[in-house]
Image (cartoon, rainbow, N blue to C red):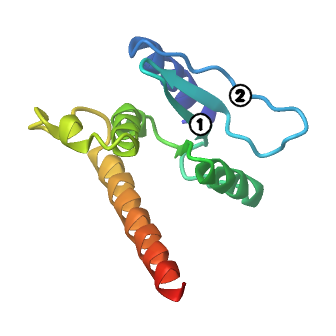
Amino acid sequence: MREKTIEGKLVKAVKIMGGLAPKFVSPGLDGVPDRLVLLPGGKIAFIELKAPGKELRPLQVRRKRQLESLGFLVYCIDRPEQIGAIPYNMEFHLAYQKGQLDKFMKGRGNLYSGGDKKYFFVHFFRFLFCLFFKTLAQQINQNKN
């Protein structure tokens, strides 16, 4: 499957969700993700699309980290099955940032409804892992002072 095919499926899925997925081009700033995902409720993410099995180039990895350090969500998609996890993951991050995880989880007996469950849980646990180490680093810095 080609990157263009996955990109078409992403655009279609985002449109069904009531959002937009415009192409993201930034002259003078190389390595930016291919698409923005804009969903209702002010949810935004950057999406880098790859052919199956292809990985981010070093510049793209640096740009991804830069955007994430600014608080944006950045995803790399190389399989159509990964598309279904993105809206849920975006909602989770937004609820976390607003301190509304209880509200988010309430009424969600089934944590995930579509897409690639393995992909969702990998990102979910990566998020928790990063949160743990961020908190740990903050505590260490506080103890030094």
Front residue (pair 47, 81): 47
Q: Amino acid at mark 2?
A: Phe
Q: Residues within 10 Å of mark 2 (few under 14, many from 20)?
A: some
Q: Amino acid at mark 1?
A: Phe
Image quadrant occupied by the N terminus? top right
Q: Residues within 10 Å of mark 1 (few under 14, many from 20)?
A: many
Residue 112 appears in the rendering: no
Residue 82: quadrant of the picture: top left
Image point (40%, 63%), residue name: 131
Q: Which mark is residue 24?
A: 2
**x, y percentage for residue 16?**
40, 13
Front residue (pair 118, 65): 65
Image point (39%, 43%), residue name: 93
Residue located beneath label 1 in the image: 46
Callout 1–callout 2 Cβ contact below 8 Å: yes
* Element on which disc 2 rests: loop
Image point (71%, 51%), residue name: 63
Left or right: residue 46 compared with residue 126 = right
**x, y percentage for residue 3?**
61, 35
Give the distance between the C-alpha atoms of the residues marked 1 and 2, in whole angstroms. 9 Å
**x, y percentage for residue 126?**
40, 61
Left or right: residue 76 compared with residue 13 = right
* Element on which disc 1 rests: strand
